Structure formats: C-alpha cells, structure tokens
Amino acid sequence: MKHFTSVKDLDNLEAALQLAFELKKAPYKYQTLGKNKTLLLVFFNSSLRTRLSTQKAGINLGMNVIVFDINEGGWKLETETGVIMDGDKPEHIREAVPVIGKYCDIIGVRSFARFQNKADDYGEKILQQFIDYAGVPVVSMEAATRHPLQSFADLITIEEYKTVARPKVVLSWAPHPRALPQAVPNSFIEWMVAAGYELVVTHPEGYELAPAFMNGLTPEYDQMKAFDGADFIYAKNWAACNDRDYGKVISTDRSWTVAARQMAVTNNAKFMHCLPVRRNMIVSDEVIDSPNSIVIPEAENRLFSAQAVLKLLLDQINAQ
Ligand code: AN0
Ligand code: CP
C-alpha cells in the first residue's frame, strides 16, 4: 500500500480488520515502530474525531505528530495550474506540498469537496496533488469523494455488533440545513460492498449518488421499505450530486429524520452516524439517546482504523 485513499488501497481487507482488532486489544504493542518518524496532519477543514484519533493513533505507534491547520497558520494556497498569481494567494500547492513532504514521513490530509466544480471534486484535485508531489505516503482524512478512515471504523463497528454473518445495512439520507459532501456515503458504500453485507441505500429522489459509487445498487426511495428488517441504520446527509443540482440542498424534508417511527420496522437495528450530527434534523433525541445507538463506540473505533492504516504504512517504510 503506497497511499491510503480508499478501500481499494488495502491489499487484504480481512487482514486489515484483524490488525485493527489486534490494536484495539493491545494499542501499545507496536509503540516503537514509529520511532523517529513524523506524521504531519494537514487540515483544510474543521475536525474533532479525525484530528484527535489520527493524532493519538500516531502517538500509540511511537510517531512524532504535527497538526497543521493550513487555513489558519499557513499561506493561502493557489491550487489552479497556469495562473498568474496576482491575487490574494501567496503560495502555490505545487511548492507547498513537496515542502511539507520534506518535513515528515507520512502526510494525512483533509480536504472536503468544495462544490465549485464537480469535475474538480470528483477528480480529487487537491488529494491528487498531495499524492503526486508529496514524495511520502498520503493518508486521506476525508477528501472530496471518500472518507476511508471513517468507513473502516464503521466496518470495525459493524463487525463488533452484528448478530448474523451477513447483516442488512441501510444507508439513509437525512435532512440537514447546509450542503454536505458525498464523501461519507460514497465511501461507506464501497466498504460495505467490499465486506459483502446486504446493503440498501435510501434517499429522496434527486439525491442519487454517483453511479461509480453505487456499485450497481438501485436506490430505494421509500425509506420505510428500506428500513424493514434492517440490522444497522447508517444515517447521513449529503448534498445533491446530479450535474444540474451539484452541491445544492434540494430538500430538508424532516419526515426523513430518523425517529422511533422508522426504527420500529427494523430488526432492532443499531443506529450509526459518523458525527458530528445535528440532533432532531438527522436523528431524533430519542433514537440517538437509545441503547441501540452506537455512535460513541463507532467514533472510538476511529482510533483503530487510523492505527491499523499507519501501522501498515510504517511497515512498508521500515522495509525500504
Ligand atoms: C462533514 C461531511 O459531511 O462530510 C464531515 C463528516 C465527517 N460534516 C460536516 O461538515 C458537518
Ligand atoms: N467523523 C469525522 O470525521 O469527524 P470529524 O469531522 O470531527 O473529524
């Protein structure tokens, strides 16, 4: 594994999952593996879980960790090629990235979809420049189209809580006042498909995800039908992805808010969300505060998805 940006970067998903469980049991087992290695986490966007869990994961492996909120302390970056830089951006990403790469052994980067241009977002314009110019392994901490560390933690969580070998997992759109990226649902689908679970995706018409991420699944527009007999409900908002409405909020229909009414038709399903979550928009207080809500253990597992990925990358660096 050269970089970690999607489930496809893992050579062996089952082995990675077992490694995450091993690390959960013994987080300090490899505490000298990262000695004299530096992990540098670059944030273009806000974060609580990713920032703290990835930092802690690096520390558990004995790494030095630097966290860089690039929009706060850094120079404003130009990301377009071939432009005359006479505006408000003093530095080009073309220099910034290789320089950052000189100061560390692994780079983590968070760079959300900007919703200015679908081709730029779906071409992973920012993440790709890190991969092309950093000179060191790059870990996605949520890029424009995927959030693999989150999906890996989601998979760990489902493996821990499932009561049947092949659970029914439902990804449900839920309302939110602001436009959110498709990275979490896109990548959740990829990991659930890779795990071989039964997966149903439900959302209002107009919220279709990119076909490349749907993996041949057909959306179920009736949320109650989708929830029928489900073992896991994974709620998430995302903005429209179709070319006409790309990046727009086209519905805030609160009948889609996950509440006791929908949970009642499930197979006593566990409730999941990546967090941060808006209560009584995405999910009712009653559901998120119920014993079936596993959002906190899900967030805890971010430690072990990050630690497993960093361990795999360190093994590779140390083997060179
Ligand atoms: C982000 C998103 O929806 O992609 C991060 C989630 C992990 N959420 C918000 O911006 C609220
Ligand atoms: N779930 C997640 O990635 O949370 P943060 O945005 O707080 O890092």
Image: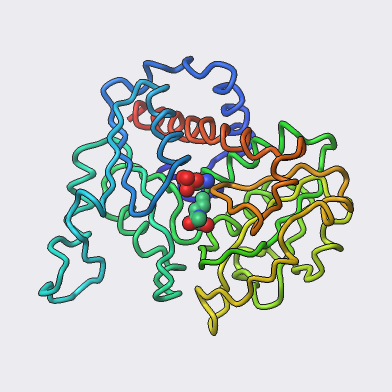
Image location (x, y in percent) of residue 173: 67, 62
Image location (x, y in percent) of residue 244: 54, 84
Q: Quadrant of residue 154?
A: top right
Instruction: Quarter of the image for the C terminus: give it.
Output: top left
* Residue 112 appears left or right of 240: left
Relative to 119, does residue 55 appear above or below in the rendering?
above
Q: Report the label total.
A: 0
Instruction: Quarter of the image for the N terminus: give it.
Output: top left
Q: Quadrant of residue 184?
A: bottom right
Picture residue at 36% right of the left edge, 43% below the top: 108
Picture residue at 74% right of the left edge, 46% below the top: 287
Does residue 142 show up? yes
In the foreground, 121 or 2: 121
* Residue 229 appears left or right of 275: right
* Residue 302 appears left or right of 311: right
Image location (x, y in percent) of residue 87: 14, 73
Relative to 129, does residue 306 appear above or below in the rendering?
above
Image location (x, y in percent) of residue 155: 65, 40
Picture residue at 75% right of the left edge, 68% below the top: 219
In the foreground, 257 or 202: 257
Judged from this view, the residue extending furthest toward the bottom is 244
Does residue 146 show up? no
Q: Quadrant of residue 123?
A: bottom left
